[in-house]
Amino acid sequence: MPELSRKEKTEFNKLQKRLRRNVANAIVDYNMIGEGDRVMVCLSGGKDSYGMLDMLLSLKQSAPIDFELVAVNLDQKQPGFPEHVLPAYLEGLGVPYHIVEKDTYSIVKDVIPEGRTTCGLCSRLRRGTLYGFAEEIGATRIALGHHRDDIVETLFLNMFFGGTLKAMPPKLLSDDGRHVVIRPLAYCREKDLAAYATVKGFPIIPCNLCGSQENLQRVQVKAMLADWEKRYPGRTETIFRSIANVAPSQLADRALFDFAGLKQQAPEAGGELRIRAVNL
């Protein structure tokens, strides 16, 4: 970490406590980690996953339960990927780690036409590889570094482009029921994680595969939310809270609420039917 002034140290301490508190609250609220769990912490080399590992290491020291952390990075064989960075960083921390090598980069480049977005296929390949490796090492939890802003962006992506009302849940059971995925950063703001990474000096590794795709739908949604947040501070937090405060009867999903079975309720026996006049 660089030398900080007294004021900068005070601000950093506040930031660190806020992130630690947010991660701890998310873990408790969703029962993400239990006694004896082996948590596979997925590291991409980006600011968010570095911050997640840092917070989990800090909480492990004071948690009332015993759990294990294992860092895992998927080397997708992108050209110019600095293979030495993560091993050197993790060895310096003394964290058990694995580097999983799989050339998903070539697969994505072969399948996706030039100019088309690659994130969909890339994420599916990455997820499948990580799920398989989690089983190999006996991990009971798979920790991903998605933060609050990622979750809200996904909500709008699904609404605008997929016609579904869903986001990224803080805790998820995989489709085959064999893996529990957790997102300890679910309560954390992206700008807090960015500020934390800058002060901590994490060795950030950029993604050469998708980082420059300015036509990504997520980039457009992120810009929209940033504009909203600038004009109406706190809006992103309010939208996030709405995900945890759902009223199925006020939506239109017949599988979630029995709209067909709704019937007018008759007054109780001996009771009076009261009519209230309303001026329109």
Image (spheres, grey):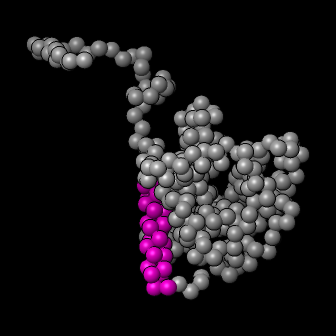
Q: Quadrant of residue 140?
A: bottom right
Image quadrant occupied by the N terminus: bottom right
Residue 235, horizontal then vertical, whole percent:
45, 48
128 or 176: which is nearer to us? 128
Residue 255, horizontal then vertical, whole percent:
49, 25
Q: Residue furthest front?
A: 231
Residue 104, horizontal then vertical, whole percent:
83, 53
Residue at image x 16%, y 17%?
276
Looking at the image, is 33 positioned above or below residue 160? below
Q: Which span is picked out in magenta? A: 5-32
**Which secondary structure class fits the magenta region best?**
helix
Would you say 112 lies left or right of 277 here?
right
Q: Is residue 144 visible?
A: yes
Residue at image x 48%, y 80%?
8
Residue at image x 63%, y 33%?
162
204 or 127: which is nearer to us? 204
Looking at the image, is 16 positioned above or below residue 276? below
Q: How many marks?
A: 0
Residue 87, horizontal then vertical, whole percent:
75, 74
Residue at image x 60%, y 44%?
221
Q: Quadrant of residue 83?
A: bottom right
Would you say 254 lies left or right of 216 here?
left
Image quadrant occupied by the C terminus: top left
Q: Is residue 65 visible?
A: no
The question of residue 26 being in magenta is answered with yes
Would you say 14 lies left or right of 174 here?
left
10 or 247: which is nearer to us? 10
Looking at the image, is 276 positioned above or below residue 61? above
Would you say 94 lies left or right of 125 here?
left
The question of residue 9 being in magenta is answered with yes
